[in-house]
Image (cartoon, grey):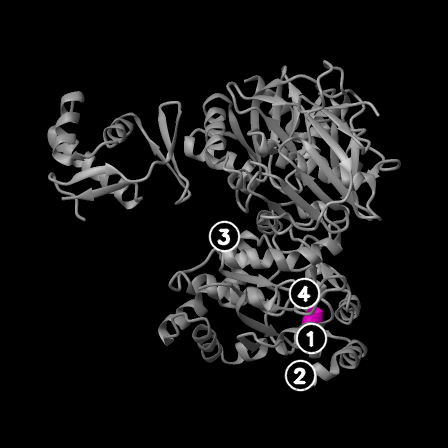
Amino acid sequence: MTDRLLCGWRVRSAVALPELLEWQGDDRPPDLTVRLGAVDDSLPGGRTISPWLQIDGTGTGLLEVPMVGRFLVQRSGDITIAPQPEAREAEIRLFLLGSVLGLVCHQRGLLPLHASSVVIEDGAVAFCGHSGMGKSTLALRFAQRGHAVVSDDVCVLDTGSPAPVRPSFPRLKLWRDALEDAALPTEGLERNRRGQDKFHFIEPQAGVRGPIPLRALFMLRRAKHGEQEGIERLSAPLDILAALETGTFRMQIGRALGAEKALFQAHALIAGTVPVYTLRRLPDAPPGRWLDAIAATVRG
Amino acid sequence: MPLSPNSEIVRRSHPFEAAIGDTQVLLDVEQGFYFGLNAVASRIWQRLEHPVRVRDLCLLLKAEYDGEEARIDAEVFAFLAQLEAQNLIDVSG
Amino acid sequence: MSGLTLIASYPKSGNTWLRAFLASHLRGGQPIDLNVDLARIANLSARILQDRHAGLEHADLTPQEVALLRPLTSRRVAHDQPDFYKTHDCNFVPPGAREPAIPADAINRVVYIVRDPRDVAISLAHHFGWSVAASVERMADSAFRMGRSSPCLNMNVEQWVSSWSAHVESWLDAAGLRLLPLRYEDLLADPLQRFTELCRFLDLDDTRQAVSRSLEASSFSVLASQEARTGFRERHRASNAPFFRAGGAGGWRSGLAPELAERLAADQGRVMARLAYR
């Protein structure tokens, strides 16, 4: 199987990863190697970081998702997956390219944001927020306008200056209503989980290969009762830091791995160099309305 | 301990620090909060790396900054009280 | 305080009234803003809360995995963020899980509110925009769940509610819980007495003056007129009536078709008799 590209890494995987671009770089050995094999149900010396994740003193992580399988993730980049017999490939990829990717980032001192991102004006513009805030939906709408997709769910940043984004892959996870609103059929799309009304939409126009600068961050918020919709630039440093901390993917893993100081400094660097906005929307507001305003805000 | 001109002050914890624009930000990991310092506050914070008497700190700032002396004293006291409330400094004497 | 303090009930049984009372009472009897202060007693199944404490996104889990995960997450919330929470979870072990969603060791104490199922049926119908017949059917359905995400994401994670009778008995008969059962009808009939008991149970200020003030701030007329003025964010999208609609007891006598009342009596009769709903 051809090696693939993920966040600048060469990935050799026993599990097919169609959402990743093919590796076209040098002939270095793989940075990440994904194998199938037996994985014990507990990690010797492991601490429970969250209900289904243990991490041991060397930084090795063990994630167990009951109906998908176990993922043993070593700092060396060796990843062993013991799938449940009934697990589907899309389900295995979902956790490999989500939770496991987040863990790998923290192991390597990178900053993963819980964000989908697209290319606007030669830079990455990231949409950051909790589940259901419309990250992937906004990315889809920009993709339909011809913008390349940099990441879905996990947007990986280098912590050095000036914090470039390492593109992950052009796949978006979308609920049925978001696809239908965008006039896209769900036929032929893989389901996120068996029986779930959420699908994997792989953006056919190619993704992005090399690192690109982060141009802007939009923290997606739900307009609370009586609040106005709109885009607002955060200016107080402490507000920006708090927003970035909330927006960091699996912050508790970073803490458990002793990366808190590096993460704080990465947050501070972004806060000092990249404009951070809140985008407040009513729960049912159509996403299309905001595209022009976002693009105009980015252009400044 | 109440703050007085004779009190000796020193930083208690060693939070992470970073500059964002003109603001110096401290993160106290144990207590889990951020603390922002403007230019003058951050100058005071630097001085607190080693123990210093409040009176000497005020004299130093009066030498460095223009301003009514009573007002500088009052602002230094108010700022130190904030630091103490956040457990960022030890006060003795 | 350690562990979760739960305001538990089947849906539409008076939970919001208790939350409004507590929201005011915990702030010394001050008036409350429905859309701000009710958050003081958050829904335990709120997606953001569950995602944060579980360390992953429930949107990527199957319903069975959610059922397996919830008790583990409940323990973490109990440890890291002990507080008052609202819940509509049934206290039996959900199908496919090993423990109830909120295991006893995560619980500090429980206030359980129960309401005449004939009034619940009418209220549920208005809340979800269903027919009353659909409510009656749902109330007998041991597979009744809330928070399912389809075709879009629900702001809560999945909760197994089960039937009305199972819900009531799962809590009232639970072993090893400090539980205060309250009938909604008794709260209405003698609010001062009942809310004083509530405050005593929760180690809150139970003086007559304090309880009266918080009762005033959370009275049905205050809440309903506030909803009429500003709306209420917890109202269901499909609802065909205000959230604070009737607020009384016994509305079923005129609002519930006799055959539906009979059907409820047939489905829920044993537990109704136990709670003196005749």
Label 3 vs label 4: CA separation?
A: 33 Å
Specify start and end residues of the magenta stretch as a single range: C117-122
SS class of the residue under badge 4? loop
- The spot of residue C175 in percent (x, y) is 61, 77
A164 up-or-down from A184: above or below: above
Disc nearest the viewer among 3 and 4: 4
* Residue labelled with disc 4: C99
- The spot of residue B66 in percent (x, y) is 16, 22
Crowd tier of the residue under label 1, counting other residues whose Cα lies within 10 Å: few below 14, some 14–19, many 20 or above: many
Label 2 vs label 4: CA separation?
A: 31 Å
Three-letter residue code for mark 1: Pro
**Labelled disc at residue C277:** 2
* Residue labelled with disc 1: C117
Is mark 3 in CB contact (under 8 Å) with mark 4?
Answer: no
Task: Note whether residue A193 is visible.
Answer: yes
Disc nearest the viewer among 4 and 1: 4
Crowd tier of the residue under label 4, counting other residues whose Cα lies within 10 Å: few below 14, some 14–19, many 20 or above: some
- The spot of residue A39 in percent (x, y) is 73, 45
Quarter of the rendering occupied by the N terminus of chain A:
top right
- The tag earlier along the polypeptide, 2 or 3, is 3
Report the residue at 63% width, 15% height from top: A122
Q: Chain of mark 3?
A: C
- The tag earlier along the polypeptide, 1 or 2, is 1
- The tag earlier along the polypeptide, 2 or 4, is 4
- The tag earlier along the polypeptide, 3 or 1, is 3
Q: Chain of mark 1?
A: C
Is mark 3 in CB contact (under 8 Å) with mark 1?
Answer: no
* Residue labelled with disc 3: C36
Label 1 vs label 2: CA separation?
A: 8 Å
